[in-house]
Image: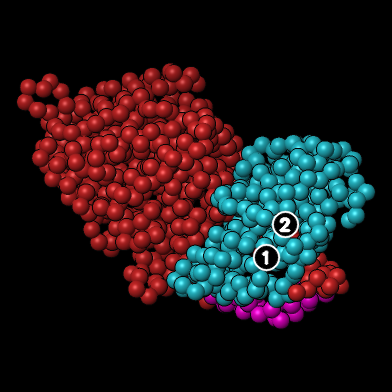
Chain colours: A cyan, B red
Amino acid sequence: MQRDMPTGPRPKDVYFFSTCLVDLFCPEAGLDAITLLEREGIAVHFPEDQTCCGQPAYTSGFGERARAVAQAQMQLFPNDWPIVVPSGSCAGMMRHHYPRLFADDPLLKARAEALAEQIFEFSEFLLDVLKVHWRDSGKPATVTLHTSCSARREMGTHLHVRALLAQLSGVNVVTQSHESECCGFGGTFSLKHPSISSAMSGDKVDALKETGAEAFISADCGCMLNLNHTLQKRGDSFQGKHLATFLRERLAAAGEKS
Amino acid sequence: MNAPENTQTLSFIPASEFKQRTTEAVADAHLRQSFRSAMDFLMAKRAAQFPDADALEAQRALAEHIRRYSLSRLPELLEKLERQLTANGIQVHWAENAEQANAIIVGIAQKHSAELMVKGKSMVSEETELNHAMEAAGIAALESDMGEYIVQLDGEKPSHIIMPAIHKTKQQIARLFAEKVPGASYTESVDELIGIGRAVLREKFMAAEIGLSGVNFAVAETGTLCLVENEGNGRMCTTVPDVHIAITGIEKVVEKLEHVPPLLNLLTRSATGQIITTYFNMISRPRQPGELDGPKEVHLVLLDNGRTQAYADEQMRATLQCIRCGACMNHCPVYTRIGGHAYGTTYPGPIGEIISPHMMGLAATHALPTASTLCGACGEVCPVKIPIPDLLIRLRAEATHDARPGHAPLVGQGAARSALMDFVWAGWAALYSRPALYRAFVWLATRFRFLTPPMQSGWTVSRTPLKPAPRTLREQLAGRHLKT
């Protein structure tokens, strides 16, 4: 999971791959992520033809369908700028699984491997590439963190999110029990095995609430939607926020430009 | 060692039954609580053994290498093992499937006019359902591992490969013993319960003509069968009766004795958080002239039962690296919720999801590889680095597709194939690989979001419906001149 980080001057331009979930269900998380990147003086480019990384078909065993979708995405990044992805899961797909998806095609595999090197999960990009140090003067808040499995086990970025939150002096981060355990979403798993998925999501929601935090923070919209909709079904007002949204709000609260 | 034609040894489990069982299991608060606390305990025990992540990585890499090396030379090592065991006076038998394995063992028992077999813990004998075969031949087979003894007494199967009775509470065992063990009175004292079991078993060890055991590592170069255990019952089974029969899967062979310690080291730490088990048995030959104890005859039954199917495929061969520590199930959030019985297979949890399709065929097992969020916890803790999530995806593909050109079909290949799913994914790919179509789709989805169905299949069982945002990100960005 460890990777060599680009050295030299900060990139001036990045691509933003929003992911299909952010585009359609959590656009505010995407806007907030872009706002934060722009705040760092970076030109953010959004290839208009982007759709989805292809993960749903890939993990369902329909690799040939995932390939068609992945191949369409791979054409959208002509420059070697970093590609920032506001999701550990989709970033993991593009960084680690694209090269495998095209293992039997030398040209596409080479393209996939080059692309993989351009992929950065949002928090990873902020911390390791931009090396941000932000000052927080928002109101004191207690939050808990939900780390996604892909962030933890594929991208190694769960600690990045924690480190970014640690920069916020007004924010107290409390740790849930079984933090490393999956929230039960699992893409099509939640549709195929609703009872197991519900049991896992229910336990995760309980663990997050037991921390006494006022909200949970997640860097993955898949987990966040799963948990927020579980909470809503329970009639619970406790909700999760995407990391980008939370960071943007904290900085805006500090009177800086948003 | 061809793939077995008969893979129906174990009871057939339709996918619908798996779903039914998992639904019942998650609704059982008591079961959920017992597995949660047992798995938490085991995870903590393991974690305490590996304080240094880098050191663990080095050990895992070595263990993986040993297992891959052994498998890369499997046919040769098995022949070497047979030669060496034979030279040591141990009789070697080959079984292509469970039926053959059971027939071999029943045959040996009948030759000795045996009435009783005592068994040490052996998951392979669970796999072949040996106890039923022995019973059918009129020979009693008694489990002597305490956990196995408990589940046998209750007519159940193990719910965990290392801790077979982990699903049972102290109180349940107390009631079971009081009911089923002659002369036993009700007690919830664990020491007393174990005492009751031991008293029964002690007598049986002396009476049994046959002792059966599993094998953790079979060393080809020396012809040594290694057996890892904690209760001493394994040693009793392999030394007290006149005849010892060991049974194991063909993948358990390693080349050299020095290949054992790195594997053993990770096996016990990963499984129970022990540095070493109480007993480690190395069995090399039957009793020699002038020796006072030990079995007069030793047999080894080597079972295929679908393993060669996994072996034949470069990627799926990794399945056979497994040393049966059970860490994948201890760390699996699905196993923790549903317990071992819901799987309906000998091997539950993540390893069961990737090995059972080879043993039982995909027709019976295609639901199992789908019962995972691909969270990766199993692969992360696996001491021999089996890429379990990748193998789950691979089996999902094999269950829903015909064999790829140049690949032999798996047993039950394409069993979960459905015209509907083919259509759904074809449509999905068409939509998401055509940007104009996708844009039209999301535009409509946002404009008609009030039509969002209130029931969305499994999603809304415990969640409110997913509803598109009023405007997509791309639409909101279009106003900000951010397009490239």
The location of residue B273, given as percent across then percent down, is 46, 30
A18 over B430 or under it: above or below: above
A159 over A69 or under it: above or below: above
- Residue at 21% x, 49% y is B78
Q: Decide which of B15, B163 is in the foreground and name it.
A: B163
As helix, strand or loop, the secondary structure at mark 2 comes to loop
Quarter where residue A6 is shown: bottom right
Residue matched to label 1: A81
B427 over B25 or under it: above or below: below
Residue B473 part of the magenta segment: no
Q: Relative to A246, is A57 on the left or the right?
A: left
The location of residue B7, given as percent across then percent down, is 32, 59
The location of residue B447, given as percent across then percent down, is 83, 75
- Residue at 38% x, 33% y is B265
Amino acid type indicated by mark 2: Arg
Label whose residue precedes the other's in the sequence (1 or 2):
2
Label 1 is found on which chain of the structure? A
Give the extent of the magenta segment: B421-449
Q: What is the quadrant of the C terminus of chain A in the image?
A: bottom right
As helix, strand or loop, the secondary structure at mark 1 comes to loop
Q: Residues within 10 Å of mark 1 (few under 14, many from 20)?
A: some
